[in-house]
């Protein structure tokens, strides 16, 4: 009888020990999962903030691109204008003071430029 009782007690101890060992593993697993979840949450928030700042930068750069494209278009128009006869006449009048035959120039009295 003694051996039967001892065997029964040993089995109960083994079963109790297995349950405790399993609880420790489960606790460790839960702690690891909580750490992993918190790390993922923190990193996702950081990425959200970075994404928002990059969206603002992208919008600013898109505006700058649009402004530069408009500037390039106006420069193209100016380049076409500089190749016309009207541009040459305007520059001759402004820079050299030249006029067409038969044109009359009216100047105010406070012009200090000599008439040539």
Image (tube, grey):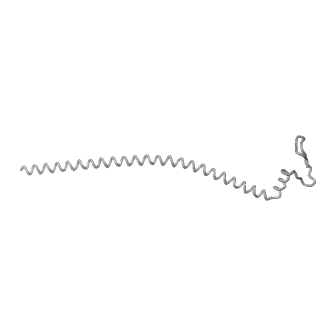
**Residue 69: x, y in percent?**
67, 54
**Residue 104: x, y in percent?**
92, 49
Left or right: 21 with respect to 64?
left
Number of numbered discs: 0
Left or right: 19 with respect to 93?
left
The residue located at (11%, 51%) in the rendering is 7
Left or right: 86 with respect to 104?
left
The residue located at (86%, 52%) in the rendering is 96
Left or right: 33 with respect to 55?
left
Which residue lies most toward the right here? 102
**Residue 27: x, y in percent?**
30, 47
The residue located at (57%, 49%) in the rendering is 57
**Residue 90: x, y in percent?**
83, 53
The residue located at (37%, 47%) in the rendering is 35
Identify whether 77 is placed above or below 43.
Answer: below
Which residue lies most toward the left here? 1
Identify whether 91 is placed above or below 108.
Answer: below
């Amino acid at each position: 009888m003694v051996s039967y009782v001892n065997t029964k007690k040993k089995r109960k101890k083994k079963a109790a020990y297995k349950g405790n060992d399993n609880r420790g593993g489960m606790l460790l697993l839960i702690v690891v999962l909580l750490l992993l979840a918190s790390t993922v949450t923190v990193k996702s928030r950081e990425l959200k903030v970075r994404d928002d700042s990059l969206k603002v930068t992208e919008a600013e750069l898109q505006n700058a691109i649009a402004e530069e494209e408009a500037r390039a278009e106006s420069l193209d128009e100016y380049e076409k204008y500089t190749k016309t006869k009207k541009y040459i006449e305007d520059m001759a009048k402004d820079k050299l003071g030249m006029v067409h035959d038969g044109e009359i120039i009216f100047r105010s009295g406070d012009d200090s430029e000599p008439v040539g």
